[in-house]
Image: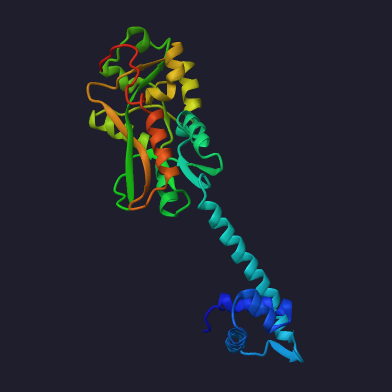
């Protein structure tokens, strides 16, 4: 199998086809005529056919040469475009940032982060791929994204985790729910409630299930939803109890339409952070993104309890 064509020979060939002169080609490429002649002989040897004919002092292309010229011109255009694109990446503020994040992070964390990021990197192209933890891990391992804003992954030695904050999952109930009015949760009442929980395929659902299994409880009548916003609306209407981090319901907690109550004496906590390939050398834009995430989520670690409660 023959190897790829030499790019220097291709450039000399295209220039020679345009000028029709070894002398002019040598002048434009700052080479000697013998160097150009030797280059063309090597190229003809590579492709296995004659590409040029001499008519007096003029050089013309053979049929094979005309066919090669069509491909060679496209090759040079592609090479020039690649060089230009790489040159732009080398300039301050140019480049791209591909981010993976859950829909909740997209709504509550990314907007202020990206607003600040664009002020520092106005020419950066930003792409966001919505994905829960498992989807974000897959996207990272397949190089579809550069960074993922997500829960700490388990048993992923290829990935590096930059911690941002630790949150606490709590019961969220509507303002008219008996637990909200009593200001406490009794252990016997927990299995009797109807629950509205986030997607069964999510890490959060798994954590909740494991927590109550250790407490020797089974949560009955579970409604599964893939939307945090829909979950909060159903909770406000009194259609069930959810288990979420209070920071996703800050507005509702502040206005009093939802009340947060601890799950029990033992906390159920999650670690959030930014994840990337282990050993990846982060650029200034990526370092800035992580720093902004840390600033924006600085208050997320302290849950809004609203009232004291025990289970």
Above/below status of 220 relative to 189:
below
The part of the image, by quadrant, that contains residue 164 is top left
Above/below status of 144 relative to 64:
above
The part of the image, by quadrant, that contains residue 224 is top left
Query: Can the viewer see residue 302 in this picture?
Result: yes
> Is residue 89 found left or right of 295 in the rendered image?
right
Q: Residue at x 68, y 87 (%)?
A: 51
Query: Can the viewer see residue 226 in this picture?
Result: no
Above/below status of 40 relative to 69:
below
Please state the horizontal and vertical placement of residue 260, each as a whole percent of the image: 36, 17
Q: Residue at x 49, y 30 (%)?
A: 107
Which of these two is toward me, 247 or 81?
81
Q: Residue at x 59, y 66 (%)?
A: 79
Q: Residue furthest top?
A: 181
Numbered circles on residues, count: 0
Please state the horizontal and vertical placement of residue 68, each as a whole percent of the image: 68, 79
Q: Residue at x 46, y 16 (%)?
A: 252
* Image quarter (top left, top right, bottom left or bottom right) of the C terminus: top left
* Colour mapping: rainbow
Please state the horizontal and vertical placement of residue 236, each as a whole percent of the image: 47, 16
Above/below status of 57 relative to 107:
below
Which of these two is toward me, 182 or 143?
143
> Is residue 188 found left or right of 133 in the rendered image?
left
Please state the horizontal and vertical placement of residue 172, each as a whole percent of the image: 39, 20
> Is residue 9 found left or right of 302 in the rendered image?
right
């Amino acid at each position: 199998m023959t190897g790829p064509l030499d790019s220097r020979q291709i450039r000399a060939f295209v220039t020679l086809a345009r000028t029709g002169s070894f002398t002019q080609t040598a002048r434009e490429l700052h080479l000697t005529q013998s160097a150009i002649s030797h280059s063309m002989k090597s190229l003809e040897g590579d492709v296995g056919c004659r590409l040029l004919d001499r008519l007096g002092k003029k050089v013309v292309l053979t049929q094979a040469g005309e066919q090669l010229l069509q491909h060679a011109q496209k090759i040079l255009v592609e090479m020039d475009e690649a060089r230009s694109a790489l040159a732009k990446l080398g300039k301050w503020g140019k480049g791209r940032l591909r981010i993976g994040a859950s829909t909740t992070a997209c709504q509550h964390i990314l907007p202020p982060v990206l607003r600040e990021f664009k002020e520092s990197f106005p020419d950066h192209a930003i792409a966001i791929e919505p994905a829960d933890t498992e989807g974000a891990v897959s996207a990272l391992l397949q190089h579809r994204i550069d960074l993922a804003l997500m829960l700490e992954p388990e048993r992923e030695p290829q990935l590096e985790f930059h911690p941002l904050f630790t949150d606490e999952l709590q019961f969220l109930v509507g303002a008219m729910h008996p637990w909200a009015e009593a200001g406490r949760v009794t252990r016997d009442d927990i299995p009797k409630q109807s629950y509205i929980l986030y997607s069964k395929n999510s890490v959060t659902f798994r954590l909740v299930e494991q927590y109550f299994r250790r407490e020797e409880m089974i949560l009955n009548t579970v409604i599964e939803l893939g939307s945090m916003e829909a979950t909060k609306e159903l909770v406000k209407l009194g259609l069930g109890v959810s288990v979420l981090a209070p920071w996703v319901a800050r507005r509702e907690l502040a206005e009093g339409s939802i009340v947060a109550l601890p799950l029990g004496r033992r906390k159920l906590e999650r670690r959030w952070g930014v994840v990337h390939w282990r050993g990846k050398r982060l650029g200034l834009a990526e370092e800035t993104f992580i720093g902004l995430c840390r600033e924006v989520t600085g208050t997320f670690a302290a849950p809004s309890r609203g009232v004291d409660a025990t289970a």
